[in-house]
Image (cartoon, helix red, strand yellow):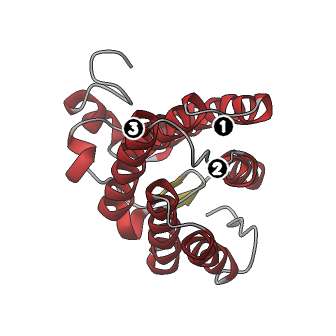
Amino acid sequence: MPPTFNPLPSLVAPAAFLATGILRIQSSHDPLNLALAAHALVVGVALLVRKPAKQDAPLLEQAAAWGFALLPMFFVKVNEDAPAWSQALAITGVLFTIWSVLALWQSFAIAPADRGLVTGGPYRLVRHPMYAGQMLSLLAILLGGASLLSWLVVLVSFTGAIWRILREERMIEGYSDYAAAVRWRLIPGVF
């Protein structure tokens, strides 16, 4: 088994997500910020309870995955004056992401790893619902009014998500049978 990349000691990464969730709640009671706070809290707990990986990606790939995942957290700001439709769409994406993390629960990871194949919940609809929800929420946030920097960060993040998808599909045991049963990666009928 290759060495496991821990960008921080095992309790610090979950604590950072938990702290982010708490800070979001304290900073704003905007519905989208509250949904993002709930997401951060769920991810923090999922990182605490996850089971060991059967296989991890190489260290450099793990570091890249963490970077792609965390980039939007630091550089994409929520416009609280965004139109209601974009906030509703973003909240829908966040809730879909939370559902996906809850379905993965002990198999949740940020970096590509094999912690067992999960096929229930939203994973019956598309093979990568967590990424689909994240992409939907980020796109909705951008459409609600965002800077050029936010657009560039999200483009890099989306590229990283596609790379993570393709990498995970090669790592997880039994994935080819699952891919035959659930055809679409992100959007039914498209990709």
Spatial separation of the CA atoms under disc 3 and disc 2: 20 Å
Q: Residue at x 72, y 48 (%)?
A: 71
How far, Cα to Cα, is label 3 from label 1?
19 Å
Of labels 3 and 1, the one closer to you: 3
Q: Is residue 187 left or right of residue 70?
A: left
Residue that badge 1 annotates: 157
Of pointers 1 and 2, the one earlier in the residue sequence: 2
- Which comes before the other along the chain, label 3 or label 2? 2
Residue 79 pos. (x, y %): 61, 45
Residue at (34% x, 48% y) in the render: 96
Amino acid type at mark 2: Ala
Residue at coordinates 67% horizontally, 75% vertically from top-left? 16
- Categorize mark 2 by other alpha carbons within 10 Å: few (<14), some (14-19), many (20+): many
Q: CA distance from mark 1 to mark 2?
A: 7 Å
Residue type highlighted by circle 1: Ser
> At x 49% / y 43%, what residue is drawn?
134
Q: Which residue is mark 3?
A: 89
Quadrant occupied by the N terminus: bottom right
Q: Secondary structure at mark 1?
A: helix
Q: Amino acid at mark 3?
A: Leu
